[in-house]
Image: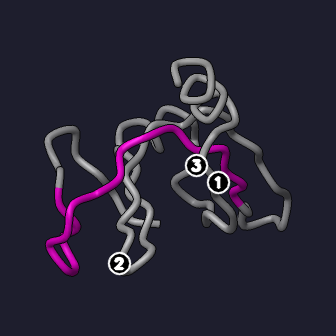
Amino acid sequence: MRDMTPSRERCPACTRRLITTRFDTTFRMPDQSERLCFGIPGGLCEDCHQLYIDPDLIELLDLGSGRCTFAIESDLVIQEQAWSA
């Protein structure tokens, strides 16, 4: 997981566009506990598979010492897309 600024639209590693949506994530903390976070806004690079989350949000959620070990697009986003189709 890498940091994302609100205005970032492109991946800093490969410059491709980021897919901006909400993610359900798991963070592993230094004490080996896991923290689940739902509906986290972020950007995913489709090419290099890096997830970018705003550093201020990471700080607010006290996840700075954790490592993102899993992220998937939030079910709420998928449900909204299904209902609008």
Residue lying at 61% horizontally and 19% vertically, measured from the top left = 83
Eye-nearest disc, 1 or 3:
1
Colouring: one colour
| The residue positioned farthest toward the right in the image shown | 33
Of the image marks 1 and 3, the number of the one nearer the N terminus: 3
Foreground: 65 or 67? 67
Q: Give the extent of the magenta segment.
A: 10-27
Left or right, residue 33 beside residue 38:
right
Looking at the picture, how far across and down is residue 80, in whole percent? 58, 23
Secondary element under disc 1, as helix, strand or loop, is: strand
Of the image marks 3 and 2, the number of the one nearer the N terminus: 2
Q: Amino acid at mark 1?
A: Ile
- Report the Cα–Cα distance between label 1 and label 2: 16 Å
Left or right, residue 66 beside residue 8:
right
Residue 82 drawn in magenta: no
Residue lying at 48% horizontally and 32% vertically, measured from the top left = 60
Check residue 63 in the rendering and tell me which mark sits there, or answer none.
3
Left or right, residue 1 beside residue 20:
right
Disc 2 packing (10 Å; few <14; some 14–19; many ≥20): few
Residue lying at 35% horizontally and 38% vertically, measured from the top left = 56
Residue to which mark 1 is pinned: 72
Residue to which mark 2 is pinned: 47
Secondary element under disc 3, as helix, strand or loop, is: loop
Q: Amino acid at mark 2?
A: Asp
- Report the Cα–Cα distance between label 1 and label 3: 17 Å
Foreground: 63 or 72? 72
